[in-house]
Amino acid sequence: MCRIVHRSLVEVVDPRQHVGYKEWIACDQGGTIFHSPQWATLLSESYRYRPRYFTLNQGGQIRACLPIMEVDSFLTGKRGVSLSFSDQCQSLVADVADFNLLLQNVLEYGRSQEWRYVELRGERLLCQEIPYKRFVQHTLPLIKDENVLKAQVRKSAARNIQKAVKEGVKIDVTYDLSGVLSFYRLHCLTRRRQGQPPQAKQYFINLHKYLIDDGLGFTALARHGQSIIAGLICLHYGSNAIYKYGASDEKYQNLRANNLLFWEMIKKCAYDGFSTLSFGRTDLQNTGLMVFKDGWGGERSELNYYRYDLAKDAFISRTNNLQGYEALFKKLPVAILRLLGAVGYRHMG
């Protein structure tokens, strides 16, 4: 699909193979791991989604992009999402005119492909529209000065860091597959506790293959003696890092390993030269997690998802959810939840 509008060329590209996109996104300071070709590869290989990145080109160079993943599910329908399993993936544009031009092309393309809707996650230029889902996010500016970072930490969080150290909790930062698989065990336990199926094991294997092994992230694991009791996965791209996944064994909750993990992640990301660290999205109902993230000195802000219903030709609000299944999922064995996750996540993106 190519259209010339006002001397600019709107083109749909696949970021996995498009050299021009790879060069452009590597230089764009607003790009995150979710805009990267590697993230597109992870989603495509794990769930067979089709990358459809709408770009605005001028003089043979990309100058704007609205990334879209086409999800084609016989259970949940066909749609475009920016982007599946991404906390947020806003357009990278110079102004609202460029955004409107790209969005118009996305909607026209979606109609031609019989999409049910287009979902845009964290798109700041849609703040006047009705959100479909509401979250919050925390973003921490980073500086290579541990004393400054420490001064921003809430006193209760600082005490918990010291408690973990006193109890003998150790943090290992790893880049190998074994670290990701150790984290995955904790991920399954945590998702069951939350009443949700875990992502498929193959997804995490692919996450290591296409991102961590390519130098775009790390796993941090908390150990107590011989036991791995908590962990996180942090991803990064350009100057931006994000805390993507966290998990723990609640039997060791009293050791406050998560506090030490967060502190070590913050120090590492600052030392490695990243300018910002996102703590990811948080459900509005999860006040405990919000308070925990508040304690590190970052800024809390709204994170809204917008859904454009192509049949209604309008942005819509959410009408239902799956929260009623959480109580059931909490009672199921981990093996059953893993099976549900392996089968179901492709239809949820």
Image (cartoon, rainbow, N blue to C red):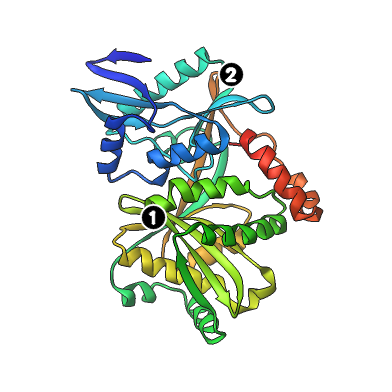
Q: Looking at the picture, does residue 156 appear above or below residue 166?
A: above
Q: Is residue 54 visible?
A: yes
- List x then y, in percent, for residue 185: 64, 60
Q: Which residue is mark 2?
A: 312
Q: Quadrant of residue 247?
A: bottom right
Residue occupying the point 42% across, 55% down: 217
On the image, which quarter does residue 345 sit in? top right
Which residue type does callout 1 highlight? Answer: Ala
Which sits in the foreground, 224 or 194?
224
Query: Label for residue 24?
Result: none
Q: Amino acid at mark 2?
A: Lys
User: Is 190 on the left or on the right of 334, as rendered?
Assistant: left
Gap between marks 2 and 1 measured at Cα = 37 Å
Pointer 2: residues within 10 angstroms few (<14), some, or many (20+)?
A: few
Point out the image quarter for the C terminus.
Answer: top right
Q: Element at badge 2?
A: loop
Give SS at disc 1. strand
Where residue 188 sits: x, y (%)?
67, 56
Side of 40 where 240 appears, left or right = left
Q: Nearer the viewer, residue 321 or 271?
A: 271
Question: Residue at 55% across / 31% down in the picture?
Answer: 48
Up/down of 308 relative to 184, above or below: above
Left/right placement of residue 25 relative to residue 348 reads left
First-in-chain label (2 vs 1):
1
Q: x%, y% of residue 265?
A: 43, 66
**Image position, residue 275 (x, y; %):** 30, 58
Residue 241 - label: 1
Please tell me in which quadrant of the rendered image residue 150 appears.
bottom left
